[in-house]
Image (cartoon, rainbow, N blue to C red):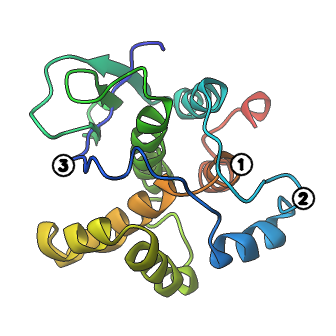
Amino acid sequence: MPASVLRCRRPRPSAVSGTRRFAPPATLALLALTGLLQVVPPAAANTLADIQRLEELINATGTETQVRDDCQPNHAGYYERDGKGIDRLVVCRNTIDMADVEAVWEVMAHEGTHVMQACTDGPALQDAQIPRTLRELRSLAPHYAKLLDEGYHPRDQRLEAEAFWMELQAPELVFALFERNCAGWLPSGAR
């Protein structure tokens, strides 16, 4: 995996990497609307090719990706952009197992959501999707819902909820949302 940069201020719960994920009903509805329902199986199967595809999309926006060994304990990755030249997504090799494709995908999908949010200068999901997003987090990843409530300022909770939710989605949906949110940043060949 090429060097990349992600910035996430959240601890990485160990319970997620070993769980099996299924596309929740709201995801299926969104897939039906975007025309991807026929392509996506009910279980998200994350592969190295999925990670590479997402990294290519992220890099196509001008965001640099890095793998670093000097991250704070319990930080799986982060995204940072300062408007003065820093625009990077970091995956923290010193805190996650880079051989665990699911763990790497989760970090890339989470931090990639923050790239989507930078592309839109706001949320990546439509307002109407947020109640379903929060319900799905409470149902499928209650540790994330608890972390949102207890670990984030209310002004950051929506953006982080989107990022946590994205970790649970099938790669095809993540790609489609990335392409939709960052359409103005992607060269035509990257889509």
Tags 3 and 2 touching, CB below 8 Å: no
Which of disc 2 and disc 3 is earlier in sequence?
3
Label 1 element class = helix
The vertical placement of 133 against 120, above or below, is below
Label 2 element class = loop
For label 2, the crowd category at 10 Å Cα-Cα, with few meaning under 14, some 14 to 19 and many 20 or more, is few
State how far apart marks 3 and 2 are (Cα): 35 Å
Residue behind mark 2: 38
Which quadrant holds residue 144? bottom left
Residue behind mark 3: 11
Kind of residue at badge 3:
Pro
State how far apart marks 1 and 2 are (Cα): 11 Å
Residue located at (46% from left, 63% from top): 165
Residue behind mark 1: 172
In the image, taking residue 47 as reference, residue 6 lies left or right, namely left
Kind of residue at badge 2:
Gln
For label 1, the crowd category at 10 Å Cα-Cα, with few meaning under 14, some 14 to 19 and many 20 or more, is some
Kind of residue at badge 1:
Glu
* Residue 127 drawn at (x, y percent): 52, 82
In the image, taking residue 55 as reference, residue 8 lies left or right, namely left
Residue located at (57% from left, 30% from top): 51
* Residue 52 drawn at (x, y percent): 60, 24
Tell me the quadrant of the picture where the C terminus can be found. top right
For label 3, the crowd category at 10 Å Cα-Cα, with few meaning under 14, some 14 to 19 and many 20 or more, is some
Which quadrant holds residue 121? bottom left
The vertical placement of 156 against 183, above or below, is below
Residue located at (33% from left, 28% from top): 91
Which of disc 1 and disc 3 is earlier in sequence?
3
